[in-house]
Image (cartoon, rainbow, N blue to C red):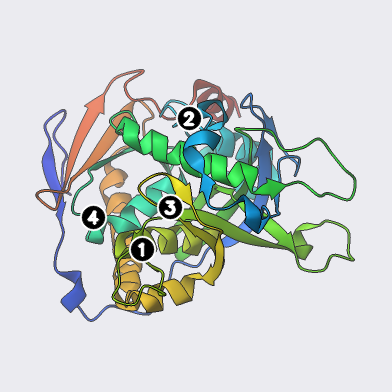
Amino acid sequence: MFQVPIREPTVFAELLEYFNLDLPTQTRFEPKAVGFFSINRDGQFFHDMSQLQLIKLPKEDAFPMDLTKQLNLRCAKAFPDYSECLDKILDYIFGKQKQFFKKDVKGFRLQEKIVCHIEVLQKLMYTPHESTEDWSILVSRFKDTIYMCVDYSSDKKADANLLALETVFKYVSHQNVNNNKPPQPEARSSFHYVFEATLDDQLTVLYSTNMCGAVLKNKGIPLSLDNLEFIECKLGSVSKTQDATIVKFSPKQTIMWWAECYLKTVKKLYVSSINARGCADFPQFTTVETLCQENDQMRVTQVGHYFLISMLKKIKNIMQEVDDPDVMYRFDYMANSKKIFLKKDVGPKIWNIIPDWYRIALNDE
């Protein structure tokens, strides 16, 4: 078995030229929704739909919309600290013990093999096409389950500003229209779906993601999950084309949107183009498939899909050597070298991504 040296980085993977490979088709990452929860602006967890938002676009005469004036950082979602990144999905899981846990000769344990947030999967899906931005993923294994999260501590402030812009745009473009008229969704609040994907008999992935917003399939039927179609809202920079009437977004944006929508099982988007002055045009309706076809990215999406599956299996294999929440593996992607480096750290409270309450609860059971 490959042994990882403590505190000494070693090369875990080198990106090959996947575009020339005959990609396998027998294994698919097929997510399905298994639950939901809400988080209010104070970060409190609720097992309900209270923060669900239904999309209602602003009137066209509000555009071009100057987002530099609309921007309010108090409405923006802050990047999560890695010590809290799994708290909410673990809250959800622990409230569904009969659904997700089992008890055997080894004790009380989670049936899923990997638990994470959607950002981990997005980073991996996009990595074969990432040439400028590094990333770090923190991984630990506890009672046969692997827990993963993205380390945002090194992200640039510019990225936070971009997220704030997008968050504000979503916020002003949504309105809750629940027939029962509950309180309006709050700034910095979010509605989350929990998805499960099974790669094979030995590997299942459970992850959570905030959903942008939804529309009613049938307005004459009361609000229910079966009557909702989720849609993403995005801001994008338009690539210049010879035909000025054609709006074409950059391949990088297209692939990033595709990865997110695929993992959320969302097929439709409202996309608004934003210029250098920070003014956004009226959002246009499109589909993920259309965006990929317009940018000749269908082959690229297959590469991202295959790379995600390959890396999850590699991570699962390397993590078999440890089952201790006080042992943390750090996977660092260096874009300039196209390599993923791995190092291990040992000791209590080191890069702890599994909260104490969850450890105690599982050990007590």
**Percent x, y of residue 32:** 58, 63
Figure quadrant of residue 154: top left
Of 68 and 210, nearer the camera is: 68
| Amino acid type assigned to the residue bearing label 4 in the image | Glu
Per the model, the C-alpha gap separating discs 2 and 1 is 24 Å
| Amino acid type assigned to the residue bearing label 3 in the image | Ile
Q: Which residue is mark 3?
A: 274
Per the model, the C-alpha gap separating discs 3 and 2 is 22 Å
Per the model, the C-alpha gap separating discs 2 and 4 is 24 Å
**Mark 4: few, some, or many residues within 10 Å (few <14, many ≥20)?**
some
Q: Which residue is mark 2?
A: 78
Question: Of marks 3 and 2, which one's residue comes earlier in the chain?
Answer: 2
| Viewer-nearest of discs 1 and 3 | 3
Q: Is residue 269 left or right of residue 24?
A: right
**Element under label 3?**
loop
Question: Of marks 1 and 3, which one's residue comes earlier in the chain?
Answer: 1
Question: Of marks 2 and 1, which one's residue comes earlier in the chain?
Answer: 2
Per the model, the C-alpha gap separating discs 1 and 4 is 10 Å
| Amino acid type assigned to the residue bearing label 1 in the image | Ile
**Element under label 1?**
helix
| Amino acid type assigned to the residue bearing label 2 in the image | Ala
Q: Which residue is mark 1?
A: 255
**Element under label 2?**
loop
Of 61 and 109, nearer the camera is: 61
| Residue displayed at 23% across by 81% down | 22
Q: Which residue is mark 4?
A: 130
Question: Of marks 1 and 4, which one's residue comes earlier in the chain?
Answer: 4
Figure quadrant of residue 182: top right
